[in-house]
Amino acid sequence: MSAETPTETTTLLGQQECANINISSSDEAVQAKIVNPSKDAQSIPNRIKIIVLCILFTEFAESIAFYSIAANLILFANTHLGFTNTQAATLSFVYVGTGYALPILSGYLADSHLGQYNTMYLGGLIYIAGILTVFLVTVPYQLPFSTSAKTSYFIVGLILVAIGTGGIKSNISPFGASQLESCGPVYVQRFFAWFYFSLNLGSLISFTVVAYIQQNVSFFYGFMIPSIAMILAVAVFASARKYYELYTPKGSLLGEALSITYQSFKVRLSKRTNIIDKSNIQSFFDYAKKENGGKFDAHQVNRIKPLGRVIPVFLLIVLFRTVYFQMSTTWFIQGESMNLQLGNIKLPVALLSTFDIISVMIFIPVVNYGVYSAYQKIFGKRISRFRRMGTGMVFAALAMLVAGIVESNRLKNVYENPLPQTVSGKTFNASANITVLAQVPQFALIGLGETFTSVTAFEFAYAEAPEELKGIITGMYLLAVGCGSYSGSLVIAIINAITHNPSVPNSKWVPKNINDGHLDYYFYFLAAFMMLNFTLFVTMTTFWYKDDNSYMTHKLTTEEIVPDLDAQNILLIPEENVNT
């Protein structure tokens, strides 16, 4: 079978492999039953098991590669490239942000030209070239590079890594979910949970083993490990090619979507809106329909309506990700100026990020199999995706509040009990009495936020996307993630510009030396801003999204498969009990 060639029997074969489902319909309702639920509904064919394991391993290894660079990027830029704290934080924001901004382009390529498999494979090869370039900067040559040459090669390597990860990120989760779609939505939802679990497992290794080697042995070995991981990721992903269901790209709707959006604005702002029957306008995009004065047929407009549902949600996720990315930037800088000694052991600063990762890995199964199931038992329906995402935003605000309290205490203590502390050759004036373990609660809280918001956002992006927009919509979500990283750098610049007073020494909230600033005020500001964002999110989802007309809901007709709470079989719940 050629690289993205469909087979007519794919869907039926997948359904027969996963479960023997008899479906009959009438004018009253669609009824369904599972035949031998204890056996057939629970069995997954070996082919799909191999696919899932290979995809999860690919995500796991790619996560090691990406986050091993991010873990101590600020420290490497400080100690090896001569960057200031502000410059290093900006580099980190831009690296992560670019890695999440480019997936929308690769999503377009996958949807319109290359297909998901080819796009990911090409992205993996570019990724390997980039990470090897980063690794080569750390090789101890007899004639060492100048700092400017190191910086140039390092940045080129980061750019290639960002391009490569962009090719993978927007496609791997929808690609994996599509392999399981014929098995029912339960398995798709579980795939996203374990996909995010694999991502965090890779991050855990990056922020523990790799970060320790980078900080206490050398960056040479610290960058060798992610290079090997990425090579393995591409090799394992390609090895399962014969098992994948590959499809010819149907063409992206992006160009058509842009034209319809332009036409909608044009009609909406024209005087013709006075004669349009308002009952025909259920969505902003309806203005582009011919019957409302536009140029497009109804079916063309309806195909791109999912964009109108996802874009506002993704915009409000940007600030959540801005808060999330404080872990690798301002929280890292905060940790450097806290007591890193634990008995005779000196803790690597990046180790603290593992508390977020560990909390995510603990809370994913607890929330999915405990909290959500309990909610369904109590209320008789599944907790909506919007409610899950909103809950995560509240935890993010609490994380910033706790970070601010910790920083206020650290600032007070650092002048009373200063502790000169050397980290990878650079000396910081740290707080002797405030241990870096005081950061654990804020990392755990942001981990809870991830469990509710980030996992659900991946699921939401996939569920809302029609086939021709899956790569684009997933890329749009990742673009929102990237914008969160970029906005982190922008917010710091704006805050410093506002708070800087030339006549008052150390007036900036986030100066080069945080002991001379007020990082706590910055954290309190983000906490308040996050709660404002949460309020907007609740208002929008309450009054705008009144009905459940997501693409996946209609695709699954009128019923959705959910796990039984009391047995190992599978039940079918009527649509009126299923909320998005």
Image (cartoon, rainbow, N blue to C red):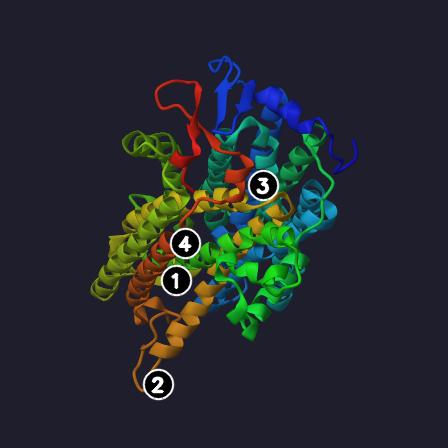
What residue is pinned by disc 2?
502
What residue is pinned by disc 4?
324
Q: Earlier in the sequence, mark 3 or mark 2?
A: 3
Q: Which of marks 1 and 4 is nearer the N terminus?
A: 4
Vertical side of 8 occupied by 492: above or below: below
Checking the image for residue 135, the label placed there is: none
Q: Earlier in the sequence, mark 4 or mark 3?
A: 3
Which image quadrant: the C terminus? Answer: top left
Q: Position of residue 182 (x, y in %)?
A: 59, 29
In front: label 1 or label 2: 2
Q: Distance between the residues labelled 1 and 3?
A: 46 Å
Amino acid carrying mark 1 in the image: Thr
Does residue 233 show up? yes
The answer to whether residue 200 is left or right of residue 438 is right
Q: Which of marks 1 and 2 is nearer the N terminus?
A: 1
In front: label 1 or label 4: 4
The kind of secondary structure element at disc 3 is helix
Q: Residue at x 32, y 31 (%)?
A: 380
Amino acid carrying mark 2 in the image: Pro
Q: Which of marks 1 and 3 is nearer the N terminus?
A: 3
The kind of secondary structure element at disc 2 is loop
